[in-house]
Image (tube, helix red, strand yellow):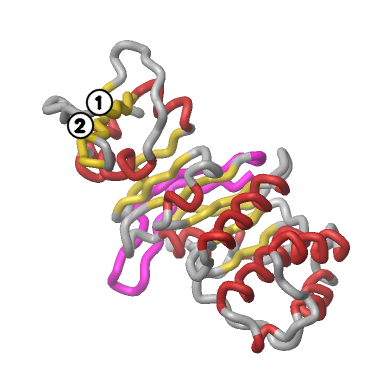
Amino acid sequence: MIEIKNLDFGYKTQPVFKNISLSFEKGNIYGLLGENGVGKTSLLKLISGLQKPTAGSCEVDGIAAFNRWPETLQKIFFISEDFAIPEGTPINNVRELGVFYPNFDESLFRELCKEMEVDPERKYAEMSFGQQKKCLIATALSLNTDYLLLDEPTNGLDIPSKTLFRQVIAKYATDERTIIISTHQVKDVENLIDPIIILDHDEVLLKASFREITDKLYFSYGMEQDDNALYSEMMPGGFVSVTRNTGGLDSKVSIEALFNTVMKNKETIKQIFS
């Protein structure tokens, strides 16, 4: 379990988080959403031990992440948006990494490369950005870590590759693994992520499962705009409107509409989900 308690963090004179508390339980694929600059990447770096809180704590299975103890590091793999291109071939790279990860499975890596339609024997330098990223995703899954942190994983992937990404993440997610996906491309992952976390400047606006969201909010789709909605926007064929769910009705969440609802009704949303 990842547990963040009363955490402060910032860069010199620029505060990022102020007294935030969050937990990430195993068996979930979390969607980490927020506008540019609110700290999504910083949060992943704090969890992976690459940044140190200025106050409070960030612990992985009860151990401070910034201690970077081997028994903690072998549980975490982080693919940053601006990853460094490994030297050599993917198969050699993953073998070198696998020494440090006790659950590494080379046969799974080869299977994943086949599913992702990339050649593990070809040098990274000869691949496109999308192919490189697919190899890193195959690497991450084959290391079989408890915690997998993905920062904008679908950037640089074409449409077929995004489909393959969703397929392998869904296939290899387990009850023992926590996956955190930080993204702006919510349509790429909306059928994967649950729960949803929405960050704002120095605070958490929302952390809720889809069930909790639909218990509190109702998403309607129709030709008429709801003037009493918390948020309403035009979409092909009509409008999507978000209102309080006072009637216990079931609805399908639109993550984009949810995000815009939260950002335009910050205090109301915090009260609804408190």
Extreme left residue here?
227
Q: Position of residue 238 (x, y in %)?
A: 23, 35
Q: Give the camera-side residue of 47 and 158.
A: 158
Q: Earlier in the sequence, mark 1 or mark 2?
A: 2
User: How many numbered discs?
Assistant: 2
Q: Position of residue 63 (x, y in %)?
A: 66, 53
Is there a contact, CB below 8 Å, between mark 1 and mark 2?
Answer: yes
**Quarter of the image that includes the C terminus:** top left
Give the magenta part as a residue range: 1-27
Q: Give the camera-side residue of 73 and 160.
A: 160
Give the residue displayed 29% in from the left and 69% down from the top: 14
Give the residue displayed 30% in from the left and 40% down from the top: 257
In the shown orientation, is residue 197 left or right of residue 149? left
Which element is circle 2 on? loop
Q: Amino acid at mark 1?
A: Thr
Give the residue displayed 43% in from the left and 49% down from the top: 187
Q: Is residue 255 magenta?
A: no
Give the residue displayed 65% in from the left and 45% down from the top: 170
Q: Is residue 46 visible?
A: no
Q: Position of residue 139 (x, y in %)?
A: 73, 67
Extreme top residue here?
247
**Quarter of the image that includes the N terminus:** top right
Which residue is label 2 attached to? 230
Q: Is residue 92 visible?
A: yes
Which residue is label 1 attached to? 243
Q: Amino acid at mark 2?
A: Leu
> What is the crowding at mark 1: few (fewer than 14 residues within 10 Å), some, or many (at least 20)?
some
Q: Position of residue 113 (x, y in %)?
A: 75, 66
Extreme front residue here?
237
